[in-house]
Image (tube, rainbow, N blue to C red):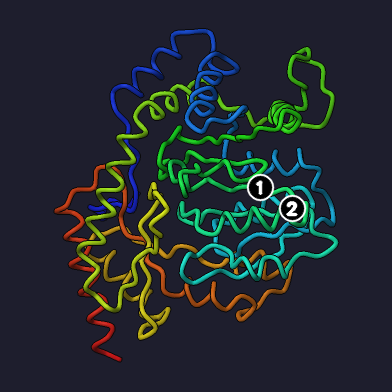
Amino acid sequence: MDDNISIPLSSPDITEAEIRAVTEVMRTRYLTVGPKVLEFEQAFCHYLRVEHAIAVSSGTAGLHCSLLALGIGPGDEVITTPFSFIASANSILMVGGQPVFVDIDPRTLNMDPKKLEAAITPRTKAIMAVETFGNPAGFDDFLAIAQRHELPMIEDSCEGLGSSHRQRQVGTYGRVGVFAFYPNKQITTGEGGMIVTNDNTLANLCRAYRNQGRDPGSAWLSHQRMGYNYRLSDINAAIGCVQMQRLDGMLTKRQAVAHYYIKLLMDDPHIILPNVDEQTDMSWFVFVVRLSEALDHNDRDAILQHLQRNHIGASNYFPPIHLQPFYVDKFGYKRGAYPITEYISDRTIALPFHNNLTLTEVEEVVHHLKRGVAQQLAIK
């Protein structure tokens, strides 16, 4: 962490309860493959009302296992978004598949359903839909398209725990859903992830892939398939168990911080707020605003520098995946391939956002953000 940043971009919410839970595990012989992992999984099943939850070492590991369990392999196309954290697309490459990007809806920042359906080819084997910043807008359409074309939908819910649309929980739309618990997420285990599904076969395959290819119930040194060490330790799971008990309260805190920002920024015509429809209950992973068309990416970068000079953590969320150096080198992508994603990405600013951000801190962030915007407009 930069010592000069007094209001960080994110901060985990850890209490004495999590610390005690870790200490209790450290006094047992079960540092891994123990009862806390099962308890954490059961908490997820109860919360989402799903049949299976499989704890893994990261959201990326969860996506990888899910793709393997669905039989996605070399040459298979998986449709996904270019406006996401890079792990969404990388997990497809990890199984030898081909990410096929679909440009986004500028209002929801999720894939445009019409463009998604047009991208389906005979080589399409799955759809990986991402709830960008935790927003499930469009997921009814994505699921209908997947069912119409008899394609499995993988739900990358790594940013969406606690969000729902029409009272349907994020993570329960796809044949499989995946969550992540990095320290900036709604809950954290330090590092970790969770696969959720109602498909018994898929669940057992994911359990095998996370555990060196051992089928559930088999001997420790019996490996039925190639697998990976994607297990979550009991130490991490103990943190997750406490965080799940605190989840509702933490989501309420996040909603309060989001409402602070909305109230203080809604009067500025050059700052576009996140769009959440009335039927969505948003859990708020991050708070990302974007600049109006009067400002461009150079202005955005200058505003970020202004915020950072004033000891405020802020960032650009997300740079387009297809313009990341690796994807440019490997696939030859150029600017213009997905123009809406590029236009939005050029103007996004992720503001400091975490459970315990105070109104005074939000007011300071907003003051410097508005000042930075005004300075850039003045030199136009």
Q: Which of the pair 374/39 is nearer the observer?
A: 39
The number of numbered badges drawn on the structure is 2
Label of residue 63 in the image: none
**Circles 1 and 2: CB distance less than 8 Å?**
yes
Q: Secondary structure at mark 1?
A: strand
Q: Which of the pair 218/112 is nearer the observer?
A: 112
Residue at screen point 37% across, 63% down:
274
Q: Which residue is mark 1?
A: 154
Q: Which residue is mark 2?
A: 126
Q: Secondary structure at mark 2?
A: strand
Residue at screen point 60% across, 79% down:
335
Residue at screen point 61% across, 75% down:
338
Outermost residue on the top side: it is: 28
80 relative to 22, above or below? below
Query: How many residues crowd around disc 1 within 10 Å: few (fewer than 14), some, or many (20 or more)?
Result: many
Q: Amino acid at mark 2?
A: Ala
- Disc nearer the start of the sequence (1/2): 2
Identify the image quadrant of the C terminus: bottom left
